[in-house]
Image (cartoon, rainbow, N blue to C red):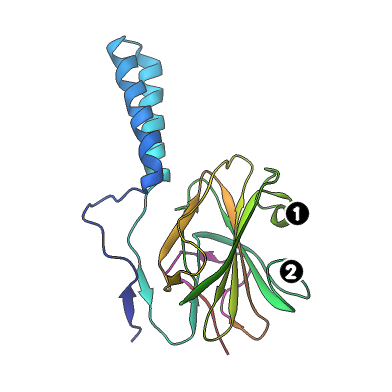
Amino acid sequence: MNKFTWSDPPSNTALPIAKAGYPLIFAAAFTTAVLALLKLVIPAVLALLATFFICYFFRDPDRVIPSQAKAIVAPADGKVIVSELTERSPYYSGKCRKISIFMSVFNVHVNRIAYNGTVEKINYQPGKFIAANHASASMKNEHNALLIKTEEGSIGIVQIAGLIARRIICSIKEGESVIRGQRFGMICFGSRLDVYLPSDTNIKVAVGAKVQAGTTILGYFS
C-alpha cells in the first residue's frame, strides 16, 4: 500500500485559491457589480463569467504527496509533451533526462517541488511569448530556472511562460531547503514546465501522459 504525506498544511477552505489570483478576482467582481448597478445586463453576465473563470484558473487544491523512497513527483499539472535523453542543457551539467509538461488554461497552474533538497541556483531570463508547446519555447520564451541539489543528484526545474502568460511567480530563494510536493510558485494563463533529471533516472511517464503536481510520480532515482 502506497504511503502519502502532506508537504504543506491543508487549507481551511473548501475551495482554496492561490494568493496571486486575489487581485484579479476582486477586480473582476468589482467590475461585475458596477455593470450590474448600471443595469448593463449582458456585460454584467460576461464579467460574472470572467470572475468565475479566474477563480477556476487560480484554484490551488491540496495534494497528498507520495512518500516512496527516491520517488520524483511532477512539479506541474498538465500533459507530458517531451520525454527524452538529451546530451546538453543550459540548466544541467552533462547528459540528462528532459521531461516537458504543457499546462493549458484549464490545468491547475500552481507548481510544486519535485524532490527534497536545497535550492542551489535560481536564474530568471526575459524572453518571448510564443506558444509553450513549441520546441523552441524552452530557450526563447521568458523563463525561470531552478537548480535543486538533492542527496541523490541535481534536478533542474524551468518555469516557462506561454503565448498569453505574462507572469512567472517563484516564492523560494537560493539556499532555501525544500521538500517534495511543496508549493513554490505558478505561471499565469497557459505555460510549460521543463524538468531535467540525471540520465540514469528510472522514468515512469511517457509522452501523452496526464500528470498532477505533487501526486504523479515521474520516476525514481537509481
Taking the spot 35% from the left edge, 65% from the top edge, the residue there is 63
Q: Nearer the viewer, mark 1 or mark 2?
A: 2
Whether 127 is among the magenta residues is no
Please state if 60 lies on the left or on the right of 76 as rendered: left
Taking the spot 25% from the left edge, 58% from the top edge, the residue there is 11
Name which quarter of the figure residue 209 lies in: bottom right
Mark on residue 193?
Answer: none
CB under 8 Å between callouts 1 and 2? no
List x then y, in percent, for residue 186. 48, 53
Q: Cα distance, mark 1 to mark 2? A: 13 Å
Taking the spot 39% from the left edge, 42% from the top edge, the residue there is 21
The quarter of the rendered structure image containing the C terminus is: bottom right
Mark on residue 89?
Answer: 2
Mark on residue 136?
Answer: 1
Q: Amino acid at mark 2?
A: Ser
How many neighbours does mark 2 have within 10 angstroms: few (below 14), some (14-19), or many (20 or more)? some
How many neighbours does mark 1 have within 10 angstroms: few (below 14), some (14-19), or many (20 or more)? few
Magenta residues (range): 203-216
